Image (cartoon, rainbow, N blue to C red):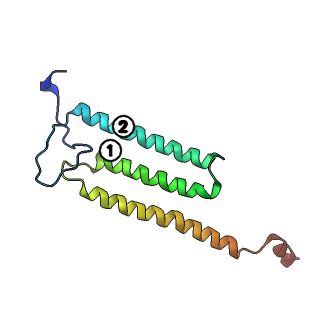
């Protein structure tokens, strides 16, 4: 492909720079597509790893929630860094804040759900007492 047909995609995937700092390298469409395909492959791999972590007996069962938490945070990082929706050619400082907020939300959902389920299990009436109450 000749140089005249190389188009600038404009999102500069993976490049962090200060506002107003000149762009050191021009990103071609080929490099942009390569970055997006890498992001897609990593996102799919992390999704498959999440399903594997839940379905396998290789991971200690109480530790499965932590494994899912780590995989979810990694996937958020991949989405924020490599996939096209968050790149507009400016600095990527907001991606760090978005990742931190995402980590907070994931932690609240995972650990809050575990706390609620543990509390409900603790407060539940044992089956033998429930059967005696029904007679």
User: Which residue is label 1 attached to?
Assistant: 82
**x then y, percent, for residue 64:** 59, 54
Taking the view exactly as shown, the residue that stands out farthest to the bottom is 133
Q: Is residue 4 above or below residue 86?
A: above
Q: Is residue 94 above or below residue 127?
A: above
Taking the view exactly as shown, the residue that stands out farthest to the top is 1
Q: Is residue 125 above or below residue 25?
A: below
Which residue is rendered at x = 52% and y = 62% of the image?
A: 110
Mark 1 surroundings: few (<14), some (14-19) or many (≥20) residues within 10 A:
many
Which residue is rendered at x = 45% and y = 41% of the image?
A: 44
Element type at marker 2? helix
Element type at marker 1? helix
In the rendered structure, the answer to whether residue 34 lies left or right of residue 128 reads left
User: Which residue is label 2 attached to?
Assistant: 38
Which residue is rendered at x = 54% and y = 57% of the image?
A: 66
**x then y, percent, for residue 33:** 29, 34
Q: N-terminal of the two: label 1 or label 2?
A: 2
**x then y, percent, for residue 111:** 53, 66
Point out the image quarter for the N terminus.
Answer: top left
Q: Total marks drawn?
A: 2
In the rendered structure, the answer to whether residue 80 lies left or right of residue 27 reads right
**x then y, percent, for residue 15:** 23, 45
Residue 43 can be seen, yes or no: yes
Q: Is residue 60 above or below residue 133?
A: above
Cα distance between the residues tagged 1 and 2: 8 Å
Point out the image quarter for the C terminus.
Answer: bottom right
Q: Cβ–Cβ below 8 Å for labels 1 and 2?
A: yes
Mark 2 surroundings: few (<14), some (14-19) or many (≥20) residues within 10 A:
some
In the rendered structure, the answer to whether residue 45 lies left or right of residue 125 reads left
Residue 83 can be seen, yes or no: no
Which residue is rendered at x = 20% and y = 33% of the image?
A: 28
In the rendered image, which quarter is residue 26 located in? top left
């Amino acid at each position: 492909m000749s140089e005249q047909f190389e188009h600038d995609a404009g999102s500069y995937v993976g490049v962090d720079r200060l506002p107003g700092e000149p762009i050191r390298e021009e990103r071609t469409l080929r490099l942009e597509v390569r970055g997006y395909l890498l992001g897609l492959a990593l996102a799919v791999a992390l999704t498959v790893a999440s399903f594997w972590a839940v379905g396998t007996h290789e991971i200690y069962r109480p530790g499965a929630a932590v494994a899912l938490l780590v995989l979810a945070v990694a996937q958020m990082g991949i989405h924020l860094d490599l996939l096209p929706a968050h790149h507009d050619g400016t600095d990527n400082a907001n991606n760090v804040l978005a990742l931190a907020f995402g980590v907070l939300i994931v932690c609240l959902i995972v650990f809050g759900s575990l706390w609620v389920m543990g509390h409900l299990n603790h407060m539940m009436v044992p089956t033998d007492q429930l059967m005696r109450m029904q007679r």
